[in-house]
Amino acid sequence: MTYISNKDYIIEVAAGRVPGSSIMYAMGERESMGTTTAGEDVWRGNELSPAPTSHTSIPIPPSIGEQMTVVSESANDTAAGTGARTVMIHYLDANGDEQEENITMNGTTGVDTVATDIRFVNDFHVITAGSGLVTDDHIKIYSKADTGLVYNMIAQGGNKSLIPNRMVPRGKQLVMRGWDCSEAQGKRVAFRLRSTDIHGTYLEGMFLFKDNVYINQAATGELKVNHTIPELSIVKISAWPDAVGAEGACSWWGILEDT
């Protein structure tokens, strides 16, 4: 169906009625924040056991991609268990194209992906589960070559990744429209929206600020932004607390368009 000009554009995109356009949305949360000088990515990697190589800044896979492994911290997240049984990985391959893969869980025994060229994990969620309907414990996806490099996770008691990091697929651009954040422990935090580009130019590994806000035991509501993010750039939100023990959540959204 083609786009009809007298209808709300965002609604039409969300409904899948605008060819070449879709909504990209991401959300995250983090508890027990520290005061890391370079900031802390908003995810719950600091709760994983064993601890990953870095829980403050989520590592980035090599641009040529790699094979990854999925594992739970509970034996109940398995093919016939009460927790998560199968999960789906939404990723970009070495070319930057969008791909998906389903993994049948095997509890605390890691299961390797079939794909060997995963460049970035954009989302990660449960598709079937036992009586609990959620994960029995943390499930993570990490580098097969290095178990300490954890790229994404589904936290205990959930069924979807809460990590606001996304890579823009090849042949697309992201028009960012809004974001928000909150803090719940009365610890002042600077939340900063970031991406690896500036003025439309991709800068590999350099997360430059796109917007920022200080917040203390409050929620911002939606903060409007208008940034165009180029292909293969990574968007994320990081936090800079004034004191140890802050906790918060965040989200962002935009329109993903063919270029």
Image (cartoon, helix red, strand yellow):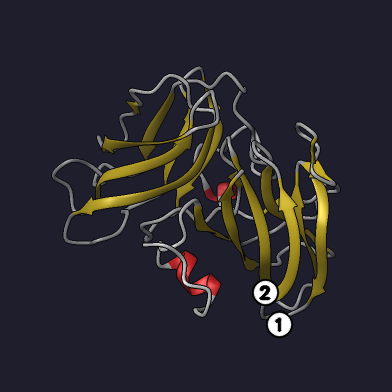
Residue 118: image tag: none
Residue 89 drawn at (x, y percent): 39, 40
Question: Mark 1 highlights which residue?
Answer: 218
Alpha carbon distance from label 2 to label 1: 6 Å
In the image, what residue type sits under mark 2? Answer: Ser
Residue 156 drawn at (x, y percent): 40, 56
Q: Are marks 2 and 1 in contact (CB under 8 Å)?
A: yes
Residue 54 drawn at (x, y percent): 66, 37
Badge 1 marks a residue whose secondary structure is: strand
For label 1, the crowd category at 10 Å Cα-Cα, with few meaning under 14, some 14 to 19 and many 20 or more, is: some
Q: How many marks?
A: 2
Q: Nearer the viewer, residue 98 or 164?
A: 98
Question: Mark 2 highlights which residue?
Answer: 182
Residue in view at x 65 percent, y 60 percent = 32
Q: Quadrant of residue 113?
A: top left
Badge 2 marks a residue whose secondary structure is: strand
Q: Residue furthest left?
A: 80
Residue in view at x 55 percent, y 53 percent = 163
Quadrant occupied by the N terminus: bottom left
Residue in view at x 58 percent, y 35 percent = 170
- Locate residue 103 relative to residue 229 in the image: left or right: left
Q: Earlier in the sequence, mark 2 or mark 1?
A: 2
Look at the picture and state if 172 lies above or below 204.
below
Residue 142 drawn at (x, y percent): 49, 31
Look at the picture and state if 127 lies above or below 103.
below
Quadrant occupied by the C terminus: top right
In the image, what residue type sits under mark 1? Answer: Ala
- Locate residue 50 relative to residue 224 in the image: left or right: left
Residue in view at x 81 percent, y 57 percent = 210
For label 2, the crowd category at 10 Å Cα-Cα, with few meaning under 14, some 14 to 19 and many 20 or more, is: many
- Locate residue 143 relative to residue 221 in the image: left or right: left
Q: Nearer the viewer, residue 209 or 111?
A: 209
